[in-house]
């Protein structure tokens, strides 16, 4: 199939090279690749004699969608392959992936202390070599020994306790306590391969049928809609207010809760992403207090997605964990069921591929906690490298440690650069005709609103695609820049958006801005009424 696609692409390139106007390429490639996505009849379920077909698989899998790695990314990857042999066929020389929060893939460097400790723990023979003391900092060596002493047999390739290595959970709990000013229990920590498995685990626990609902923000990170669909539940949407900087209104929560109840849906939990993905807002502490009160009053589990807690870029906002807010209000274990998610993939560390994270589970009875542990134990344990990094993220070098100054410089350099990139892209987007973009207060994304001309919407309808998807495909084809249509995150009906990361390195940002400017002007001129 791949050879066939590349062969067809080369034929199209040869044909278009014979045409006097090279801009015709812009219309051929996205249409070609999207049309080809389902053209291989040998793989079609309808003609297959194999035992598994689309008609026989779990229907919840068919309902599940994940736009961040969806159709447009597939097209981009095919274009990237063809660029290797047909550079002259395109008006760009590289694909720039602004579709996903994957910092190191776009040039962000790992934190030296974290990687030194991980290297020493992974290859313990290094600790016995004299030259190691010249190559590694003394505190990374000391930390590696401390971690290894907490692992039976110092075996980082062995299974651990299903909740994670106890000593690493101790370090995480101490980090949470230092952050919040309230006690944290290592027995409440469940270490996971990133935050996503923790979300799936809680959906398994809470959803038993389509009559069980989860309140989710719209726009939302597609993990939530996908997980709810896979586990057979109902997503109950609550709409963030774009006009007020993606505000979360309690009146909207109440309205959607009552509407769900009227349909016979039992709402089990409220999911809140703070800082927001894809919207980048940071909740005020007052707003968080209202949310905690709402969950307590309505008997809802609060699912707090806090993976961007280090990513706050504006001086008038600060991250507060929901646990800290709840405890400061006097609510304890018996008052509120709260699950807080953290990941090593975001923040200033960006260790996406190492797959580490945890969830802190509070406010559940002992018999329910046993069931959560049972579900965790089915997966045996999360990977040890991710566990080690999660402990380091929550217990980094401290003043006086040999690595502290270099660690601090790396952290501040990454976060200040992210803030600068966010501001540059935000200002550039707001200068484009028909585009408005709220400020990026936190996280790693911008989510601009596009006021598309009626002719563009009509063209999208004729192509049988959503208008924002139509725009994003055209953008990819003309510029090589990959963004995600807002329809993949859900949005207020009749509005159109796209999500763009702030993660390309600073030297790439001017090129992205120039490409966006040129494309958008051309697009609007083409479809202007």
Image: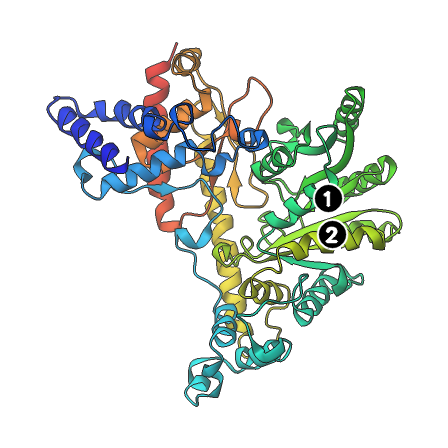
* Mark 2–mark 1 distance (CA, rounded to whole Å): 7 Å
Residue 46 locus on image (x, y percent):
42, 23
Q: Are marks 2 and 1 in contact (CB under 8 Å)?
A: yes
Q: Which mark is residue 84?
A: none
Q: Quadrant of residue 60?
A: top right
Label 2, on which residue? 372
Q: Is residue 527 above or below residue 54?
A: above
Give left or right: position of 41 versus 336: left
Q: Which mark is residue 205?
A: 1
Residue, x 55% and y 31% (percent of image)? 489
Q: Quadrant of the C terminus?
A: top left
Residue 464 locus on image (x, y percent):
42, 16
Residue lying farthest to the top in this orientation:
529
Q: Quadrant of the N terminus?
A: top left
Q: Is residue 11 above or below residue 307?
A: above
Quick one: SS at disc 2?
helix
């Amino acid at each position: 199939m791949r050879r066939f696609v590349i062969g067809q692409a080369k034929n199209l390139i040869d044909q278009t090279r014979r045409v006097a106007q090279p801009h015709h390429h812009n219309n051929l490639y996205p249409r070609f690749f999207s049309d080809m996505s389902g053209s291989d009849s040998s793989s079609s379920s309808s003609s297959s004699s194999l035992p598994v077909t689309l008609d026989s698989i779990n229907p919840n899998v068919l309902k599940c969608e994940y736009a961040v790695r969806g159709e447009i990314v597939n097209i981009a990857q095919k274009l990237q392959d063809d660029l290797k042999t047909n550079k002259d066929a395109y008006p760009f020389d590289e694909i720039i992936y602004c579709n996903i929060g994957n910092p190191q893939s776009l040039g962000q460097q790992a934190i030296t202390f974290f990687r030194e400790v991980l290297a020493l723990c992974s290859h313990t023979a290094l600790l016995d070599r004299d030259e190691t003391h010249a190559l590694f900092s003394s505190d990374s060596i000391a930390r590696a020994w401390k971690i290894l002493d907490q692992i039976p047999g110092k075996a980082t390739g062995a299974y651990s306790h299903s909740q994670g290595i106890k000593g690493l959970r101790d370090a995480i709990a101490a980090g949470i306590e230092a952050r919040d000013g309230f006690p944290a229990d290592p027995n409440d920590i469940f270490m996971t391969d990133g935050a996503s498995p923790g979300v799936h685990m809680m959906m398994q626990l809470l959803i038993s049928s389509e009559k069980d609902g989860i309140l989710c923000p719209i726009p939302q990170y597609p993990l939530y809609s996908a997980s709810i669909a896979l586990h057979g539940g109902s997503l109950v949407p609550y709409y963030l207010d774009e006009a007020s900087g993606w505000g979360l209104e309690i009146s909207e929560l109440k309205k959607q809760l009552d509407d769900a109840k009227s349909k016979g849906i039992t709402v089990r939990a409220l999911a809140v992403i703070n800082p927001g993905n894809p919207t980048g807002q940071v909740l005020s502490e007052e707003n968080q207090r209202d949310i905690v009160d709402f969950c307590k009053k309505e008997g809802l589990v609060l699912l707090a997605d806090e993976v961007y807690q280090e990513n706050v870029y504006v001086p008038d906002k600060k991250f507060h964990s929901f646990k800290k807010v709840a405890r400061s209000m006097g609510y304890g274990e018996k008052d509120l069921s709260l699950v807080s998610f953290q990941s090593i993939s975001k923040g200033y560390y960006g260790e996406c591929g190492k797959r580490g994270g945890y969830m802190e589970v509070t406010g559940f009875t002992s018999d329910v906690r046993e069931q959560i542990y049972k579900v965790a134990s089915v997966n045996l344990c999360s990977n040890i490298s991710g566990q080690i990094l999660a402990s380091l993220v929550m217990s980094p070098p401290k003043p006086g440690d040999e690595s502290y100054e270099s660690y601090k410089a790396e952290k501040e350099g990454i976060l200040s650069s992210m803030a600068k990139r966010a501001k540059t892209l935000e200002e550039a987007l707001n200068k484009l005709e028909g585009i408005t973009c709220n400020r990026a207060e936190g996280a790693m994304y911008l989510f601009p609103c596009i006021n598309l001309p009626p002719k563009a919407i009509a063209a999208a309808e004729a192509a049988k695609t959503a208008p924002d998807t139509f725009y994003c495909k055209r953008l990819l084809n003309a510029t090589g820049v990959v963004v995600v249509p807002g329809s993949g995150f859900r949005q207020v009906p009749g509005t159109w958006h796209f999500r763009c990361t702030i993660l390309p390195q600073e030297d790439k940002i001017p090129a992205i801005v120039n490409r966006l400017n040129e494309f958008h002007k051309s697009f609007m001129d083409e479809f202007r009424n």
